[in-house]
Amino acid sequence: MNSEQQYIELYQQAREMIFSHAPEAMNAVRDEAFEDFRRQGFPSKKVERYKYTDIQKLFAPDYGVNLNRLEIPVDPYIAFRCDVPNLSTSLYFVVNDMFYRDDKPKGHLPEGVIVGSLRDYPDLIAKYYSKLAKTSDDAITALNTMLAQDGMLVYVPKNVKVDRAIQVINILKATPQNAQRQVPDLMVNRRVLIILEEGAEIKMLFCDHAADDRNFLATQVIEAYVGENASLDLYCLEETHYKNVRVSNVYIDQQANSRVNHNVITLHNGVTRNKLDLTFSGEGAECQCYGCVIADKEQQVDNNTLITHKVSHCTSNELYKYVLDDKATGAFAGRVLVEHGAQKTTSQMTNQNLTATREARMYTQPMLEIYADDVKCAHGSTVGQLNDAALFYMRQRGISLNEAKLLLQNAFINEVIDHMQLEPLRDRLHYLVEKRFRGELNKCDGCKLCK
């Protein structure tokens, strides 16, 4: 059986069960998504945007999709580990693809702000759901749309500013606490819908963690509508483990004079594939997109971005940095599309990478596609090793080779972290990055995943 067929048969067999667990607006596009998935199948490496990741291989195993939606308690240790000191937040948990409804968010949200389940707000999701994430264009989005049974809605009304950051902790967990029988390796499908009306502001932090030493596959689709003069800060932090596969597609639409700050941080993982599609639909909008990756052993991280300038006077800036050790593999493919009439566009794309060993591999492909003549666009990419002269200089002053490498790697990756607007998160990441380079990130007290 090919990898597509098992999901086709799964949907056909479990369709009624999936429909019974999901809201009407999600079900309204489900069959169309199924047909789109059946038509496309999983993309091969011959598909341009998937050339660096073998998607068919990743989805070949039988993960046992979470159809029964078992209630699984939050692990207090994971909850503690995810908490960012001094960060004023409202805190929410998603266990696999279900909201943990027994938690009490820290702090109160302004009147009219919604953070909750898609099933509880049918009118809102009917207007926005699956309008940006086109299932006809991407098989992973189609798969997520046909299998996702619930999702998170974040809604901020006109001119409302949310001072507290919203922190969402995604926990992958295959075994209920104290259960006698273990659940098989698991696939989950998360869905997030973010709606910012005119003049609204919010900061979102998504943290991905795995609480069990099992094989996990997680698909995620985030749709974000950023209204005129609105502001969205979106941070995605992954600290899972080497048995985890994460495939995330983020779709963002910006209206006039809006601002988006998108950050993706991969500190520990197995195989990760992140896609960002951002479109400027209104003049005067701007986005800042940052990414940092630290990978070793045989970990793989693939970031793929497409920023479309449909209108004039918009600004985009991208900076992605990778540090790869051992036999890790990294990939960055970024494309900026400036359409006809999108004059006065300003765009800068930069990808810089360090490979610490001869076995580490980095693939980089920055691209500009421009159909306007009054623009300022540039891109650049580098792949190299640590500076021998700098290492020699520090060793001459009594610094050990390992400590010198650590200092240079920290300085290299901290350029990305220093751009982050949330100061407590920035400080926390400086601490976590140093622990990661020292090999201590997955060796915390009480962690069951130490290897």
Image: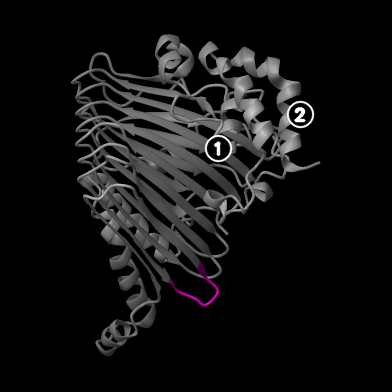
Using the image, determine if residue 317 lies above or below residue 233: below
Q: Tell me where residue 422 appears, x and y as whole percent.
A: 24, 43
Residue 402 is a magenta residue = no
Q: How many marks?
A: 2
Q: Are marks 1 and 2 in contact (CB under 8 Å)?
A: no
Q: Quadrant of residue 86?
A: top left
Q: Residue at x 22, y 22 (%)?
A: 198
Of 79 and 239, the residue lying toward us = 239
Q: Label 2, on which residue?
A: 9
Q: Quadrant of residue 96?
A: top right
Q: Residues within 10 Å of mark 2 (few under 14, many from 20)?
A: few
Using the image, determine if residue 334 lies above or below residue 210: below
Q: Secondary structure at mark 2?
A: helix
Dominant secondary-structure state across the stretch colored magenta: loop
Q: Residue at x 56, y 31 (%)?
A: 136
Q: Residue at x 64, y 46 (%)?
A: 215
Residue 356 is a magenta residue = yes
Left or right of 344 in this view: 444:
right
Left or right of 167 in this view: 131:
right
Magenta residues span: 355-361
Residue 162 visible to the viewer: yes
Name the mark on residue 138: 1
Q: CA distance from mark 1 to mark 2?
A: 20 Å
